[in-house]
Amino acid sequence: MELPAGPDEHETVAAAVHLPDGLDHALAVPVDPTAAAFFDLDNTLLRGASVFHLAKGLYRRKFFGARDIAAMLWKQAWFLAVGENLDHVAKIREQGLGYVAGHSVTELTEIGEEIYDEVMGEKIWPGTHALAQMHLDSGQRVWLVTATPIEVAEVIARRLGLSGALGTVAETEDGLYTGRLEGEPLHGEAKAVAVRALAEQEGLDLSRCSAYSDSANDIPLLSLVGHPYAINPDARLLEHARAHGWQVRDYRTKRKAAKLGLQAAGATALAGALAAASARRLRR
């Protein structure tokens, strides 16, 4: 059954979380206290890369300069147009760690709240948010599972009314960031390891759990649960999902897909302009 078109992307998320009439029964969620749902963030629940939105907010707050944001804009344009690139995400993350070194956890959390209000809130995919709400309404717990810094992931989870978040943890000393990570980024196989540990802690039956992601990098997480869903999938995940009979949902309508393409092209052009401006300043 064809899902009805969701609300316009400029409508508020609060108005979009109600499940549309006619949502197919294949996605009906049974009441089960041993079940939970795990949602990837970037391009699954949020349009674009959350770490880019964070970096852009830090740029506006003078954490770094135009040349740095130009490089990040180019990576975000690639992300929107092509999909997740581990090298790009890793480089943005490493840059971000350096920029926040010496700043406090409290400061970054407060900035995360502000950036959610400024940008992230309106970037939430209404269709995916509705799926998360469906799990919550049935009495299941819902977690974000993302490579995004845990402080920002927790802000997003709290704002969306989710149960909690698993994210990448940056090292701190006396409440200040050191510029290093604690362990590895929560990505790929690490997500599956973290969810398996959470399931054991919470008494969850993973065969009854659901997971949602857009990226083939999350196949280990999706393969861990009994109900995997490919949401706005990249080409590799779409192929894998079809081969394994997984549910596929794409909330990128043709109109929105075209708009994302324009955004990607615009971001690339802006990146070039900023880079050129930076170069001129350096030559002076």
Image (cartoon, rainbow, N blue to C red):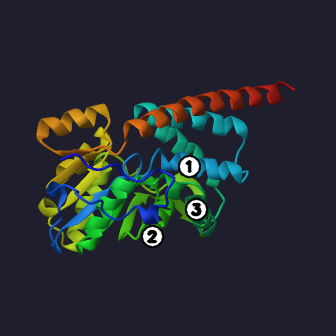
Query: Circle 1 — which element?
Result: helix
Q: Nearer the viewer, mark 1 or mark 3?
A: 3
Q: Amino acid at mark 1?
A: His
Query: Badge 2, how many Cα within 10 Å: few under 14, some, many 20+?
Result: few
Q: Position of residue 71 (x, y in %)?
A: 61, 34
Inter-mark Cα distance, 1 to 3? 11 Å
Query: Circle 3 — which element?
Result: helix
Residue 105 shows which numbered tag? none
The C terminus lies in quadrant: top right
The residue shown at (64%, 31%) is 271
- The foreground one among 81 and 59 is 81
Q: Label 3 near label 1: C-beta < 8 Å?
A: no
Is 48 rendered above or below residue 22? above
Question: Sequence-wise, which precedes: disc 1 or disc 3?
Answer: 1
From the image, tell me which residue sits under label 1: 53
Inter-mark Cα distance, 2 to 1? 18 Å
Look at the image and tell me whether residue 50 can be seen. yes
Q: Dividing the picture into quarters, in which one does residue 202 lie?
A: bottom left
Query: Badge 1, how many Cα within 10 Å: few under 14, some, many 20+?
Result: many
From the image, tell me which residue sits under label 2: 158
Q: Position of residue 258 (x, y in %)?
A: 45, 33
Q: Amino acid at mark 3?
A: Asp
Question: Sequence-wise, which precedes: disc 2 or disc 1?
Answer: 1
Q: Amino acid at mark 2?
A: Arg
The residue shown at (34%, 65%) is 18
Q: Is residue 263 left or right of residue 22?
A: right
- The foreground one among 265 and 156 is 265
Q: Position of residue 272 (x, y in %)?
A: 66, 27
Residue 117 shows which numbered tag? 3
